[in-house]
Amino acid sequence: MAVFAGAADRHSHGHEVQAIPREEDDLVVGAHVMPVRRARAARNRMMRQAVRQELEDGEQQAEEFDYGTGLPKKIGAKKARKLEMKAEKQAQREQELAEREDRKRQQEIIDVQRQQEAEKEKQEQRLRDEEAAKMKEELERQEEEAYLLLKKGFEVHEEGFGEILTESESQNLLQEFINYITENKVVLLEDLGAEFNMKTQEAIHRVQDLQDQGFLTGVIDDRGKFIFISQGELEGIAKFMHQRGRVSISDLAEASNMLVSLNTTVSSTTREINRE
């Protein structure tokens, strides 16, 4: 029922005045009576609830979207995990491919470096071989010159005929000269000159030349004798000095009788001249 205020006024003024409802008055809503303020508050609450629900729906939808994989979570946890594993495998394959490419590049660099080093070593070996060949050629040239000088010293005229010895005869004579010394071990240089039709001083020069060229090894004493020392005897002397350490001349002279044989023998250690 609606109750209108101002009934007393009607009686006091004598007029019927229709009352105007105020905000404080009640409204009839269906079978219920609700104040205006309560209705407005209810509408406000409903509006706020609708806005809040809309915001919550947006947040829920945002939470259900996976920005890591770019896929919505609404597809299901099992399928999402499967897609995630697939993405991980793809990333792993790409990483392995990148690593293989990197290893390949590194190996190519190593191969190039090895090839360069091998080429450098080959070039250095070629230069060493060329240098060794030049040194050998120079040594052979020097030996040839020394041989020619030695041979020239033995190009003597045969007595009474004035004929010059041939190259072969001169070479044989030089070898005979060396053999005479090595076989006799101790040679009086005066006798050596007489044996080969040359002066004593010339014989001394020939012996010294042969020593310089490595055809003979030995010493000339103060009595004009040449004592031939073989290669084996030289090694024995070196071993003796190494074992004794510091050796005086008197010690070496005392031991020379044991280290150097003065007996006449045919030595096989003499460097022979073999030239055509």
Image (cartoon, helix red, strand yellow):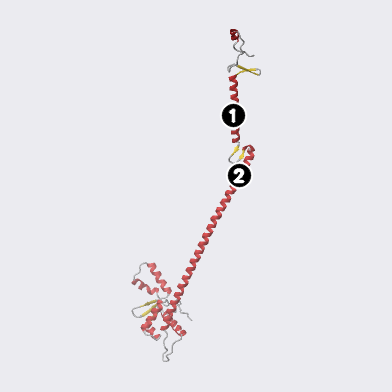
Q: Amino acid at mark 1?
A: Val
Mark yes or no: residue 81 visible: yes
Mark yes or no: residue 270 visible: no
Residue 118 position (above or below residue 54): below
Which secondary structure, mark 2? helix
Q: Which residue is mark 2?
A: 87
The residue that appears at 62% across and 42% down in the rendered structure is: 83
- In this image, 184 relative to 31: left or right? left
The residue that appears at 60% across and 31% down in the rendered structure is: 54
Residue lying farthest to the right in this orientation: 30
- Tell me the distance, in whole angstroms, between the alpha carbons under discs 2 and 1: 38 Å
Looking at the picture, how far across and down is residue 20, in whole percent?
A: 60, 15
Looking at the picture, how far across and down is residue 184, in whole percent?
A: 41, 80
Q: Residues within 10 Å of mark 1 (few under 14, many from 20)?
A: few
Q: Nearer the viewer, residue 112 or 253?
A: 112
In the figure, residue 182 lies in which quadrant?
bottom left
Q: Which residue is mark 1?
A: 51
Q: Amino acid at mark 2?
A: Ala
Looking at the image, is mark 2 or mark 1 earlier in the sequence?
1
Q: Nearer the viewer, residue 189 or 170?
A: 170
